[in-house]
Amino acid sequence: MIDNSFHIITFGCQMNVHDSQWLARALEARGFCEAPLEEARVVVVNTCSVREKPEQKVMSTLGRIRQVTGNSPRVLVAVTGCVAQQLGEKLFSRQVRLVAGSDGISGAPQAIERLLDEPALRLSLLDFTSHYVEREPGADTPSAPVGFVNIMQGCDNFCAYCIVPYTRGRQKSRLTPAILDECRHLLDRGAREITLLGQNVNAFGRDTHGDGVSFATLLEKVAALPGL
């Protein structure tokens, strides 16, 4: 086992993939390194509720982690994302020490460091925030040709068939200057295309957390950035 090493397993949508990529860079900026599952000190399962039988899939993955790591008490297992938001502290019974919901993942890097220092501690980060919380910058690695940028979180529609408002929370638009700054940073690192992510991007800016910029106007502002 390698100290200060991590392994992330991701299920679900492109936003989950993006969340996992951010978490990896944030841990790397704190001195962690990525490692294979069998060698990692920290294992994060970033989960999705939309696919078939998501709870069973997560439980099966937790069982595989215990098997591969020899059920070592030194391995810190964390569950993040939508299933974490749904099941909450019930996951502690599966030898999970960190449960972080859709908004709570922004505090995961600090929580992981604290849990490594305090082996008897368990933490849950399940509260929805009242606004879009800007995340700490991660390690400044070269960007892929296509960059992904979150512009909002959650949804206010509460459609009968959809779980998003309950696992991602109510809609919170990100402030336009922060979005544009992140886009510029990706372009400076080599990105040439940018995909804007959100549960309901057409409604960007219509909630009380926005700054009055509509999605159409945001698209114009992003499209005007040099290098895109």
Image (tube, rainbow, N blue to C red):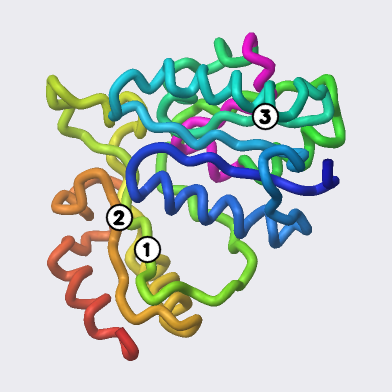
Residue 77 numbered tag: 3
Most extreme residue toward the bottom is: 226
Which one is closest to the eye, mark 1 or mark 3? 3
x 38%, y 32%: residue: 48
Q: What residue is pinned by disc 2? A: 197
Q: What residue is pinned by disc 1? A: 148
Q: Residues within 10 Å of mark 1 (few under 14, many from 20)?
A: many
Task: Tell me where the magenta segment starts and ends, as one range.
Answer: 93-107
Which one is closest to the eye, mark 2 or mark 3? 3
What is the CA distance from the residue labelled 1 to the residue labelled 3? 27 Å
What is the CA distance from the residue labelled 1 to the residue labelled 2? 7 Å
Residue 203 numbered tag: none
x 55%, y 10%: residue: 90
Residue 132 percent across, percent down from the top left? 41, 48
Looking at marks 2 and 3 on the same chain, the residue that comes earlier in the sequence is marked by 3
Q: Quadrant of the N terminus?
A: top right
Q: Residues within 10 Å of mark 2 (few under 14, many from 20)?
A: some
Q: Quadrant of residue 155?
A: top left
Say what secondary structure mark 1 lies in: strand
Q: Residues within 10 Å of mark 3 (few under 14, many from 20)?
A: many
